[in-house]
Image (tube, rainbow, N blue to C red):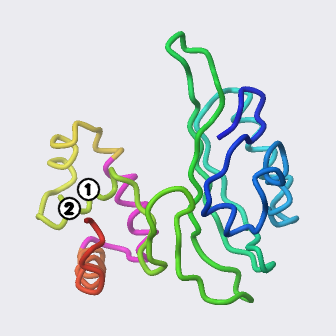
Amino acid sequence: MTDEQGYLTSFNDKWLSFTGMSTEGECGDGWTFVVHPDDLLNTIHKYNNSFQSHKEFVLKYRLRRYDGVYYWALNHGWPIVDKNNEFLGYIGICDLLDRDESSDDLNGDRIGYENIKQSKPVITKREEEILKLIADGYRNKQIAKILDISINTVRNHISNLFHKYKVSNRVQLCKQINEQYSKYPSIHT
């Protein structure tokens, strides 16, 4: 979480265990010490721009683990407002996406919520809904109507799913999902 001035004020235990930092070391702008130097300026720039406009943000950068190994991370932040719509800061999550090629294997973790396995792409709840409808044989137009979203939004989500699962069509996507669910039956518990 951050305060209304953009300084980080709290971290969960998973973040602190991963980075090896203390709450005191991470608070304020201390979190910048665990961002890869090559990603730092761009990450800070995007964070500051989002903060100034009080908009939701997504930041992708390499995050240093306590032992110095870097992992790709996706940090997602949402603005917090009070009942009078006054901006109070941000709350966010950080997903570990992948490891640097020179590091050890990643077991996978979501720093902030439930654990995830490395071999399962990180997907949004909406993408999960669309996946289920695709698996049930629905077409884009039907999915848009069921979920009350535009067909372009459906197409964008499906394109993202193709990218995340490294496939180029629905048949390949369904095959990947079926294989994945058979390996990890508790994926949606």
- Residue 84 lies, in percent from the top left, at 53, 10
Q: Is residue 136 left or right of residue 15?
A: left
Mark 1 vs mark 2, CA separation in Å: 5 Å
**Residue at 78% in and 80% down:** 67
**The quarter of the displayed image where residue 73 is located:** bottom right
Q: Quadrant of residue 95?
A: bottom right
Circle 1 SS class: helix
Task: Say whether marks 1 and 2 touch (CB < 8 Å).
Answer: yes
Residue 172 numbered mark, or none: none
Q: Residue at x 62, y 60 (%)?
A: 13
Q: Is residue 116 above or below residue 159?
A: below
Q: Which residues are magenta?
A: 154-170
Report the front residue among 90 and 23.
23
Above or below for 29 versus 162: above
Q: Between residues 6 and 41, which one lies in front from this camera angle? A: 6
Q: Does the magenta portion include 163? A: yes
The amino acid type, in three-letter code, at marker 2 is: Lys
Q: What amino acid is found at the position of numbered circle 1 in the picture?
A: Ile
Left or right: residue 18 versus residue 37 is left
Query: Which residue, given by chain and number where applicable, does mark 1 sit on?
Result: 130
Q: Is residue 74 left or right of residue 48?
A: left
Residue 174 is covered by the magenta coloring: no
Asked which quadrant contains residue 82, the reply is top right
Dot 2: what SS? helix
Give coordinates of residue 44: x percent, y percent: 81, 47
Please state the horizontal and vertical placement of residue 12, each as a whole percent of the image: 61, 54
Q: Main secondary structure of the magenta part?
A: helix
- Circle 2: is it few (<14), some (14-19), or many (20+) Cα within 10 Å? some
Identify the residue under disc 2.
Answer: 132
In this rendered view, identify the residue nearer to me: 32 or 100.
Answer: 32
Residue 38 screen position, x and y as percent: 86, 65
Q: Is residue 22 left or right of residue 93?
A: right
